[in-house]
Amino acid sequence: MTVKDKQKVRERIWEVIEDKDLKRTSKSCFGRIPNFKGASQAALRLRKTDQWQDAETVFSSPDSALRDVREYALCDGKVLIMATPKIKEGYILLNPQDLKGHEKRASSIEGAFKLGRKIGKFPQVDLVVEGSLAVDLEGNRVGKGGGFADREISHLYSEGAINKDTPISSIVHPLQIIHQIPQEGHDQKINMIITPYTVIRISFINPIK
């Protein structure tokens, strides 16, 4: 499998999301993690899992598809760590105790910058939620390109914030689940897939890379 194979997967998923009118926004999804119709329902389904209930600290990528996830985390009294776009400015920590009544605003990128604080070291993270363009049932994923999610997960491992048993999840539309994702050596796996309709738990030991 090559980088070209991954790009073919991206192009196919972007076309499906566009052609079937599955976006929550008028913006084109090409070049982005799709903000798909049903993302809020998927976030609510994640919210009902044991993994969510047990988590005190949640990590999220900054994708717009995950804004409901971030808002729910803050509303449920969980510490939220969000990566900045393309990790250009590192990571932001949002403490729900400081955000009463401002959870929705804080769940946006702009709001997180204004209401959170940048951190240099991670606390323990109990649940990771990454945006994905496509996933498969072996825990492989592909993003929009750039390897940002892989870098985020690697940072969490290297800082000791997560370990091989930490739930690493992604919310997607069912049409974003495909038979096989092309893989490269640096790719990180997920172990939970959440759609608006179901939770898929993947049984494997997460390799630390």
Image (cartoon, helix red, strand yellow):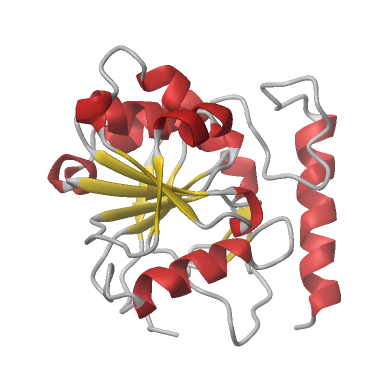
> At 55% from the left edge and 69% from the top edge, which residue is drawn?
150
With respect to residue 24, does 144 lie above or below?
A: below
| Quadrant of the drawing holding the N terminus | bottom right
Q: Position of residue 111 (x, y in %)?
A: 50, 27
> At 36% from the left edge and 16% from the top edge, which residue is drawn?
102
- Residue lying furthest top in this view? 101
With respect to residue 111, does 5 lie above or below?
A: below
| Quadrant of the drawing holding the C terminus | bottom left
Q: Position of residue 20 (x, y in %)?
A: 78, 28
With respect to residue 87, does 97 lie above or below?
A: above
Q: 153 left or right of 45?
A: right
Q: Position of residue 45 (x, y in %)?
A: 34, 32
Report if residue 107 is visible in the image.
Answer: no
Q: 189 left or right of 101?
A: right
135 or 114: nearer the eye?
Answer: 114
Report if residue 61 is visible in the image.
Answer: yes
Q: 202 left or right of 136?
A: left
With respect to residue 44, does 101 lie above or below?
A: above
**Quarter of the image holding residue 172?**
top right
Q: How many numbered tags mark residues here?
A: 0
> At 81% from the left edge and 26% from the top edge, which residue is drawn?
27
70 or 15: nearer the eye?
Answer: 70
Q: 140 left or right of 85?
A: left
> At 80% from the left edge and 77% from the top edge, which residue is drawn?
3
